[in-house]
Image: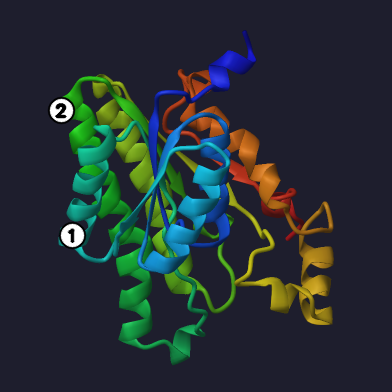
């Protein structure tokens, strides 16, 4: 009975930023739980490779090209998903960029591109998804991917921290308004996890020392350690959860000041 609560058979999940990193991992996890997965990102070739992988494993998967900074692109991606499998039941709002820049050296271009992708893009996608969920009358689950940097700050990442703090507040505000439509909105705030974007840095002595000194568990997170929170929020197992921010960070937020 317990495992049935996590079963996503018959559900359609759309994951943004699904061409690599956390997004690709989330797609694999949701597919393994039985969901039909719609992979959304700009890099069509990488999306198709993941679609092929999932289909070979017996899962249903579809690639849609989507640029979260472009409203028309977002709408077209959802329209394609809906034409194939109907209204999306689960959204994993994951697309984002990191562009470290010291505050005094930051340009307006640095600031705007980060906010446009990480915050405005999250709003565009969540708004389109929630409108369709509300019209369908069936509700759904929206999982926004925030960051511990949305709850505390880090050097040379003021724009990223502001964007992710916005995602945290957006998740809570959406949860308050959309509960009446049976739409749950929650967020996951990961700490540092090894991905292809950061492995080079965390393989250096400086990167390893940072983790040892800042993270109480003294290690990076492994992608599979996000599976439990993801499935909890996506499935009926989390049916009474909305407006919740789940930190998955090895205790990083609790480190000593």
The type of colouring in the image is rainbow
Residue 237, given in percent of the width and then of the height, sits at 54, 19
Residue 131, given in percent of the width and then of the height, sits at 18, 36
> Is residue 255 something that shows in the picture?
yes
Tell me: residue 162, above or below residue 189: below
Residue 246, given in percent of the width and then of the height, sits at 57, 39
- At x 80% / y 80%, what residue is drawn? 204
Q: Nearer the viewer, residue 217 or 52?
A: 52
- Find numbered disc 2 in the image and state the secondary structure of the residue it sits on: helix
Mark 1 sits on what residue? 71
> Is residue 127 something that shows in the picture?
no
Query: Where is the C terminus found, in terms of image quarters?
Result: bottom right
Which numbered disc, 2 or 1, marks the residue that appears first in the sequence?
A: 1
- Find numbered disc 1 in the image and state the secondary structure of the residue it sits on: helix
Tell me: residue 54, above or below residue 165: above
In the displayed structure image, the side of residue 90 where residue 87 appears, left or right: left
Q: Residues within 10 Å of mark 2 (few under 14, many from 20)?
A: few
Mark 2 sits on what residue? 135
How many discs appear? 2
Q: Nearer the viewer, residue 242 or 202?
A: 202
State which quadrant residue 136 falls in. Answer: top left
Instruction: Report if the CB atoms under discs 2 and 1 are less than 8 Å apart.
Output: no
- At x 38% / y 42%, what residue is drawn? 171
Query: Where is the N terminus found, in terms of image quarters?
Result: top right
In the displayed structure image, the side of residue 35 where residue 29 appears, left or right: right
Spatial CA distance of label 2 from label 1 is 19 Å
Residue 112, given in percent of the width and then of the height, sits at 30, 76
């Amino acid at each position: 009975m317990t495992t049935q609560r996590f079963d996503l058979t018959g559900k359609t999940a759309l994951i943004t930023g699904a061409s690599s990193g956390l997004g690709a991992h989330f797609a694999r996890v949701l597919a393994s739980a039985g969901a039909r997965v719609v992979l959304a990102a700009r890099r069509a070739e990488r999306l198709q490779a993941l679609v092929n992988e999932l289909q070979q494993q017996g899962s249903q998967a579809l690639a849609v090209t989507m640029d979260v900074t472009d409203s028309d692109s977002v709408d077209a991606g959802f329209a394609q998903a809906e034409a194939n499998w109907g209204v999306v039941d689960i959204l994993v709002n994951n697309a984002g960029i990191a562009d470290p820049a010291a505050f005094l050296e930051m340009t307006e271009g640095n600031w705007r591109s980060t906010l446009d992708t990480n915050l405005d893009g999250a709003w565009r996608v969540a708004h389109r998804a929630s409108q369709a969920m509300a019209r369908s009358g069936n509700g759904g689950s929206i999982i926004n991917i925030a960051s511990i940097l949305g709850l505390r700050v880090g050097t040379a990442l003021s724009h990223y921290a502001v964007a992710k703090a916005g995602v945290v507040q957006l998740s809570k505000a959406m949860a308050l308004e959309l509960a009446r439509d049976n739409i749950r909105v929650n967020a996951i705030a990961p700490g540092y996890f090894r991905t292809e974007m950061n492995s080079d840095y965390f393989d250096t002595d400086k990167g390893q020392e940072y983790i040892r000194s800042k993270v109480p568990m003294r290690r990076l997170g492994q992608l599979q350690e996000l599976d439990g929170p993801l499935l909890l929020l996506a499935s009926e197992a989390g049916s009474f959860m909305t407006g919740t921010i789940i930190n998955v960070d090895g205790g990083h937020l609790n480190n000593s000041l």
